Image (tube, rainbow, N blue to C red):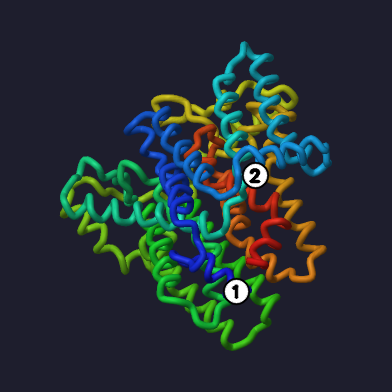
Amino acid sequence: MIRMLSADLSLFPVKVERASSLAFAVFIAVSGMAGLKLVIGAPLHWLLVLAALAAWVSLRKEPFVRSNLREFTEFSSLKPGLLFFWGAWLCFCFGILVAGAANGWVGMYTIPKYLVLVGVLWLLVVYVPTNGEVVRGLYLLALAGILGLAVIWAVGFSEWLVLPPKRFGWEFLPPGVFWKAGIFLLPPLCWLLVNQRSSSIFHWGSFFVACVLVGLDGSRTAALLAPITWLVCVSLGWLRYGSSRLFLKRIIIVAVWMVILVGGLNPSPWNPIIHVYATLGELVSAHMPGSVQAGREFGGDNIRTAMLIEGVRGVQEHFLLGSGFGTTVAQTEGLEAPMVVHMTYLQVWADTGLIGFVGYVGIFVVPLWYFFSTLLRSNARWELFDQNVLPLGIVGIYLFSGLFHPVSNEISEWAIVLPALAMLFKVTDRFEGERLS
């Protein structure tokens, strides 16, 4: 089954509908370029992403009307699982509505966006993207990220570079977004590399690019996620294979390269080998004097502490009904305007109340429950897990990053995780179909 996963993570598998696969890759890549919406405007960004999704749907072999009717018929059967899956989104939107009604209709602007996102998810559930389609979109996003930075730097378009203190990015993928072009590839590639006896050069190269993207960004969230990803893969691999010499060799090799590529480039002063890469900062300073300054401390973030305090206070004061979407903010020294609390779970609870919070959590819990209940019943558990490492990794990264980032109503933040939710929700049909193909 690892061989099947290896094929899924290849760039050009033997069986692929090239046109529809390309359209889906564009859907993932364009949506992942969050900085693009600041250049062309959010409405046009949404239009481009939705156009790519529409092209993917129209280029598939399945008839549109019949496929949607089949899904609607299943939905109308009122099965508990379906009610919980779609009910979670309804509950979340209803929480936003109730919070707005209780607070002068503040935050109501976001409901149409979430309804469009539900429509996107509906299409993804109807057609269910494959591992190959999603991963090729992530490859395209990673390639755009690394080549975009290299080309802009090489030709001297300094106005397109975004270089805050010891962080690297460019207009379409600025720091804070740049790491996302690589981090979602780490779980499936790390799992493949620690499990497969003979890994391909392509997979190693993709792993290197993903690590470099994470390292160059300098994101502290990504700096935590990279070793966590390795640790989870190692722990599960240990359960699967035990402490064989070959397995130990593979996990050590992966760890060394991850430390060199992620740890070496990441500017945190907690990084034990940052001085090996000190010349990188000097090169940047020489190329663009004054553009690079001292990096941030890994801890001791007063702004983040203030945000957590405000988030807890917001939950205490607006426990049931919420204060309205986007209203839980923190004002700290050094900031000209208040910022939304960078902790999704406190923010959602304080903004949308208990109803919205339960709905938001349910959006992720229900698909995960589908997967793990299927896993427990399966006679091919490791095969099933192998085929779902990609969506599990995406959802896991999204949930973890919510501890340090706010929730968003933009397609750029949801377009990667929505396919993963659809894949986990349809795990049985998808797994059986891919085993037979």
The front one of 110 and 358 is 110
- Residue plotted at (58% across, 16% down): 106
The answer to whether 359 appears left or right of 324 in the picture is right
Please provide percent x and percent y for residue 361.
70, 40
Q: Which label sits in the foreground, 1 or 2?
A: 2
Q: Which mark is residue 126?
A: 2
Q: Is residue 70 above or below residue 299?
A: above
- Residue plotted at (58% across, 71% down): 4
Q: Residues within 10 Å of mark 2 (few under 14, many from 20)?
A: some
Tell me, yes or no, whether the two marked residues, 1 and 2, touch with CB atoms within 8 Å: no
Q: Is residue 301 above or below residue 116?
A: below
Quadrant where the image shows the C terminus: bottom right
Three-letter amino acid code of the residue under disc 1:
Ile
| Residue identifier under label 1 | 2
Please provide percent x and percent y for residue 46.
45, 33
- Residue plotted at (74% across, 69% down): 381
